[in-house]
Amino acid sequence: MHQIISATTNPAKIQAILQAFSQIFGEGSCHIDPISVESGVPEQPFGSEETRAGARNRLHHARQLRPDADFWVAIEAGIDDDSTFSWVVIESREQRGEARSATLPLPEKILAAVRDGEALGPVMSRYTGIEEIGRKGGAIGVFTAGSLTRASVYYQAVIMALSPFHNAVYR
């Protein structure tokens, strides 16, 4: 059984990690241990590089705290070009995989509050009345009418970031 350290305690992110690892390595093949670590970037990262740095930093801190695992996984959400997205970083002892998720364009009403210094999650909670929406379906769930959720979009990115770990051509 693969021991996975998740550099997040966010249920939407953990669900995506578990589903993706189960899809690639088989149902019941993984145990996830979530831990809370700092990203080293602002609560609301802007731009692809700052967001990827947040994911890489989380992974680095998780490896320091929990060095005895098979995989370490970090997901950092950010805002880039007026859209929300995330970076996924996965490491084993031998290699790394990274992938960027699909992006969701955000309405100007939401972006204005985020540009004024608020993180997307609290802005969306206020807009929808759903507490801690970032730990649930998120802006993605709201603006896709539930067709997609944070977990479903993150799932795809985790699957893509896992590609180097099960395809020999990457080695």
Image (spheres, helix red, strand yellow):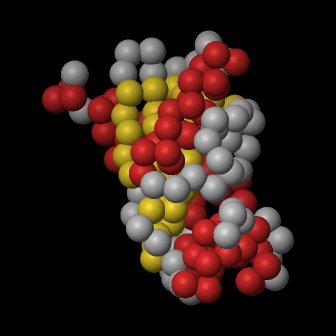
User: Does 44 sit left or right of 46 as displayed?
Assistant: right
Q: Position of residue 141 (x, y in %)?
A: 59, 76
- Nearer to us in this view, 17 or 113: 113
**Quadrant of image for the N terminus:** top right
User: Does 166 sit left or right of 46 as displayed?
Assistant: left
Q: Residue at x 65, y 47 (%)?
A: 42
Residue 15 versus residue 36 in the image, above or below:
below
> In which quadrant of the rendered view does residue 114 lie?
bottom right
Q: Residue furthest left?
A: 169
Q: Residue at x 61, y 42 (%)?
A: 41
Q: Position of residue 106 (x, y in %)?
A: 52, 78
Residue 8 versus residue 128 in the image, above or below:
above
Q: Position of residue 121 (x, y in %)?
A: 70, 66
Q: Residue at x 41, y 67 (%)?
A: 81
Q: Position of residue 63 (x, y in %)?
A: 60, 20
> In which quadrant of the rendered view does residue 167 lie?
top left
> In which quadrant of the rendered view does residue 164 lie?
top left
Residue 152 visible in image: no
- Nearer to us in this view, 8 or 45: 45
Could you tell me how many numbered marks the image carries?
0
Residue 77 visible in image: yes
Residue 125 versus residue 98 in the image, above or below:
below
Q: Residue at x 45, y 62 (%)?
A: 80
**Quadrant of image for the C terminus:** top left
